[in-house]
Image (cartoon, rainbow, N blue to C red):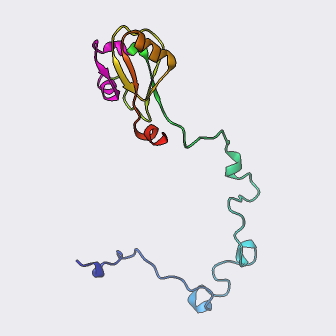
Amino acid sequence: MKLGELKPAKGATTKEWRRGRGHGTGNGKTAGRGHKGQKSRSGSGGKVGFEGGQMPLYRRLPKRGHTCRNTKEIVAINVQLLNVFDDGATVDIVALKQKGLVSNPRDGVKILGNGEIKKKLTVKVNYFSAGAAEKIKAAGGKAEVVLTGKSAKKS
């Protein structure tokens, strides 16, 4: 089979009606529009969304708020969850995924300062709260900000 031999399946296409070409065509005089009324006139059709005086759908449905297209979805983890890592380990997004603390990092991971950390860790994620960075440093570790994906483009 060649491209030039392709054609629509039988019955898939129908001949286009030529309206208003006399009563012998079966579509003469009013050309299928019936007698009188709004839809029989040229240029008719009415407004888009008009429902004959009934309250239109777009006005019946509630309108709520606004969604900003530029927001980031940041996954938050508390500092106390980092105690599952071994002392002296390097914690990054890949390590957090392996331990099951993060399933989908979305636009970045942020460490929050809830709880206590008892291990010396080097933590490399996108964001830290001031309290979390302080607690990691107090335990003898490092809090390093890593820019990836969308956050790298912004700066």
Q: Nearer the viewer, residue 57 or 101?
A: 101
Magenta span includes 97: yes
User: Residue sitting at 73 percent across and 78 percent down?
Assistant: 41
Q: Where is residue 6 in the image (x, y as percent from the top left)?
A: 30, 78
User: Residue sitting at 30 percent across and 15 percent down?
Assistant: 85
In the displayed structure, 43 sits above or below 101; it is below
Q: Where is residue 39 in the image (x, y as percent from the top left)?
A: 71, 73
Magenta span includes 131: no
Q: Where is residue 47 in the image (x, y as percent from the top left)?
A: 71, 64
Q: Point out the stretch of residues depicted in magenta.
A: 82-99
In the displayed structure, 28 sits above or below 111; it is below
Q: Nearer the viewer, residue 114 or 56?
A: 114
User: Residue sitting at 51 percent across and 82 percent down?
Assistant: 16
Count of labels in the image:
0
In what quadrant of the picture does the N terminus appear? bottom left
In the displayed structure, 85 sits above or below 55; it is above
